[in-house]
Amino acid sequence: MAAPQSQTTYTISDLAREFDLTTRAIRFYEDMGLLQPQRSGPGGRNRIYSPRDRARLKLTLRAKRLGLSLTEARDIIDMYDSPRDTGPQLRKFLAILAQHRAQLEEQMKELQANLDEVRTHEREARTLLSRLEKKIA
C-alpha cells in the first residue's frame, strides 16, 4: 500500500510509481550519485528517500528530457546543494546549456543534410519511375 503524499520519506517503490520508472533505474541514479537515500533494515537493504532525493530525481528527469547527460544533470543539481552564490551557479548552468544547444544545433544541421539527401533521392527515383512508366505505356 502506498504511503500518503504528505509523508516525509519515500520508498523506492513510491518513487518508481510516481515517476513511472523501474526500481533498477532509480538504483542506477543512486549509483551515479544523484540520489543518496538512507538505509534501514537487515544489512541496510531498505532504501529510504527524503524529499530532497525526490526533488533531485525530478530535476534529473527534467534534465534528461532536455537531453543533458546524467553527469551534466548531477553537476547542475549539485550546484544547488552548495552554499547559494547564484552568480557562479547561473554562469555554469548557462555554459552547460550553451554547450548542449550547440550540440543540438549541430545534430539539426546533420539531420537537415540527411533530409535534403533523401529528398534528392526521392526526386530522382520519381523521375526514373516516370520515364520507365512512359516507356511501358
Image (tube, grey):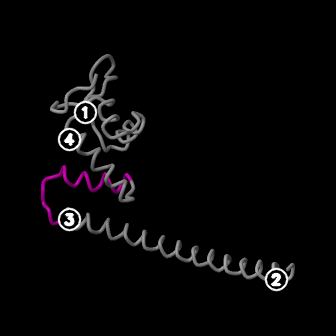
Mark before the other along the chain sequence, 4 or 3: 4
Crowd class of label 4 (few under 14; some 14 to 19; many from 20; radius 10 Å)? some
Q: Which residue is mark 4?
A: 52
Residue closest to the eye, 55 or 125: 125
Foreground label between 3 and 2: 2
| SS category of the residue bearing label 3 | helix
Q: SS class of the residue under badge 1?
A: loop
Disc assigned to residue 49: 1
Q: Is residue 129 left or right of residue 136?
A: left
At 32% from the left and 65% from the top, the residue drawn is 96
Disc 2 to disc 1, C-alpha distance? 71 Å
- Which label number is shown at residue 74? none
Badge nearest the viewer, 2 or 4: 2
Where residue 115 appears, as percent x and y from the top left, is 57, 74
- For badge 2, the amino acid type reads Lys
Q: Is residue 84 magenta?
A: yes
Element on which disc 4 rests = helix
Magenta stretch: dominant secondary structure:
helix
